[in-house]
Image: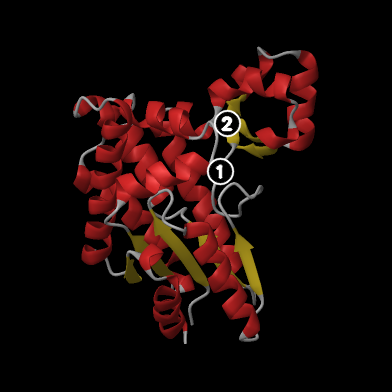
Amino acid sequence: MTKLYIVEGLPCSGKSTTAKYIADFLEKSGKKVCFFDEGSGQHPADYEYHAYITQEQLNRLDKIIQEKIKQYSAKNGNGYIVALSEFTETEQQQLLSYKIYDFLPWETEEPLMLEHWKDFAQRAVQEECVYVFNCVFLQNPMCETMMRFNFPKDWIYEYIDRINDVISPLEPMIVYLQNDDVAERITETAKERAGWLEPVIDYHVNGGYGRSISAHGIDGYISCLEERQKREQEYLERSDVNSIIIENAHRDWEKAYEKITDSLV
């Protein structure tokens, strides 16, 4: 029985709405559901807004922040997993350089992420709850391994395979929202989200992959996304993870949801 559903796809493809639709459908079917949207807070399998600070680094911080970290953070090996949301904006500025995503060296980040997935899977397999996630299986690893570090494609797939192996006891299902209108969807969404586009363009074109293709501006950002989508679909086609690809759901959501619902029954 599937105990983990994950909705994946590019930005502006409708992942949040679709993940909520799946969660509601499963609840109406009589299942106990634990739903976690992107950026929803303390995620059970992801460190979306967390830092990792070693004891040595902690000793160099302001004494007040040191005590707060010890009080509100989880000890992990020779360091602390720090939920940045527990700190004031001023305090966060001192901690952002230790953020797991965006700043941590990969040799430190990788074991932390895999350990978190393992802890989640071991708990979840014992629980009655069916989990529904938004985008932590493909999007977040791809943003790190491809966009940030520009690792070789096969190496990236092997890393995601390791996550897949960890969660396999949960019999996960991936719902992937494929999109042929990437530029159009990004442009339309940017009109609704003030200040959203510039930071994501900067992240992509100045990351490892963006620099490797000399990406620039919104066109460079779109090129990065199109290649990411190509790789994500390629991964799903080559892996043993159970998945369904919904093509251009935004053109007919009723039809898309019908197809998704049929796959859940």
Q: Which quadrant of the figure has residue 161?
A: bottom left
Q: Is residue 39 above or below residue 92?
A: below
Label 1: few (<14), some or many (≥20) within 10 Å? many
Q: Are marks 2 and 1 in contact (CB under 8 Å)?
A: yes
Residue at position x 42%, y 46% in the image? 188
Q: Is residue 220 above or below residue 167?
A: above
Q: Position of residue 64 (x, y in %)?
A: 80, 18
Q: Position of residue 22 (x, y in %)?
A: 54, 72
**Left-right relation of 65 to 192:** right
Q: Which quadrant of the figure has residue 241?
A: bottom left
Residue type at numbered disc 2: Tyr
Residue at position x 31%, y 35% in the image? 221
Label 2: few (<14), some or many (≥20) within 10 Å? many
Q: How many marks?
A: 2
Q: Which residue is mark 2?
A: 52
Residue type at numbered disc 1: Tyr
The reply to whether residue 104 is visible in this rendering is: no
- Mark before the other along the chain sequence, 2 or 1: 1
Q: How is the image coloured?
A: secondary structure
Q: Position of residue 225 (x, y in %)?
A: 30, 43
Closest to the observer, 5 or 55: 5
- In terms of secondary structure, where does tag 1 sit? loop
Q: Is residue 55 above or below residue 136?
A: above
Q: Which residue is mark 1?
A: 47
Query: Marks 2 and 1, how far apart in space?
Result: 10 Å
Judged by depth in the image, the label closer to the viewer, 2 or 1, is 1
Which mark identifies residue 150? Answer: none
The reply to whether residue 162 is visible in this rendering is: yes
Residue at position x 46%, y 72% in the image? 169
Q: Which quadrant of the figure has residue 36?
A: bottom right
**Left-right relation of 135 to 29:** left
